[in-house]
Image (cartoon, rainbow, N blue to C red):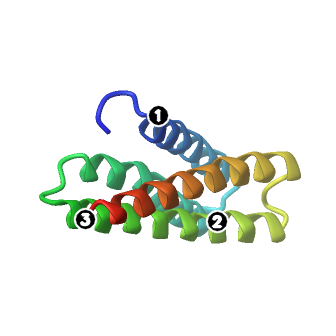
Amino acid sequence: MKGDSAIRVKSMDFAIRIIKLRRFLQNAKEFDLSSQVARSGTAIGALIREAEYAESKADFVHKMRIALKEANETSYWLELLYKTEILADNIYNSLKVDNEELKKMLVCIINTSIKSI
């Protein structure tokens, strides 16, 4: 999975977008939620990278499951930012699509990896 795998690229691109979102939120004086979404949104890619050097298939699956949990948490923070009218429709929808794609990719990787354990 090392190199320029689709999930590696997608998670890095998403993390960059989340960091830019955090800057926007902090400029709007929204510090608490900006920290939450930044933590979970950037953790996805970090966990995927960590999984690249997993000690075993089980460890790989475990790290990918945690990445999936972080992606799901990110969905919550994005939805909360949207429903409290901090995020505009277009920004929310774009981030939501990217996050949903990451979650689908993670589920596929996890399911495929479980079959080979």
In front of the other: 54 or 96: 54
Name the side, left or right, on which 43 lies relative to 17: left
The quarter of the image holding the C terminus is bottom left
Tell me what residue is drawn at x 65 percent, y 71 percent: 76
- The earlier-in-sequence mark between 2 and 1 is 1
Discs 2, 1 touching: Cβ within 8 Å: no
x, y percent for residue 24: 66, 46
Residue identified by numbered label 1: 9
Q: What's under tag 3, amino acid-wise? A: Ile
Q: Which residue lies furthest to the front in this view?
A: 115
The quarter of the image holding the N terminus is top left
Q: Residue 117 shows which numbered tag?
A: 3
Tell me what residue is drawn at x 44 percent, y 63 percent: 111
Q: Residue 75 shows which numbered tag?
A: 2
What's the distance in space between the residues labelled 3 and 2, CA to CA? 29 Å
Tell me what residue is drawn at x 34 percent, y 66 percent: 114
Label 3's element?
loop
Label 2's element?
helix
Instruction: Note whether 68 is above or below 24 in the view shown.
Output: below
Of marks 1 and 3, the one in the foreground: 3
Q: What's under tag 1, amino acid-wise? A: Val
Of marks 3 and 2, the one in the foreground: 3
Name the side, left or right, on which 87 lies relative to 52: right
Discs 1, 3 touching: Cβ within 8 Å: no
Q: Residue furthest left?
A: 55
What's the distance in space between the residues labelled 1 and 3, CA to CA? 26 Å
Q: What's under tag 2, amino acid-wise? A: Ser
Instruction: Note whether 5 is above or below 18 in the view shown.
Output: above
- The earlier-in-sequence mark between 1 and 3 is 1
- Few, some or many C-alpha atoms within 10 Å of disc 3 (few <14, some 14-19, many ≥20)? few
x, y percent for residue 51: 27, 53
Instruction: Note whether 73 is above or below 57 in the view shown.
Output: below
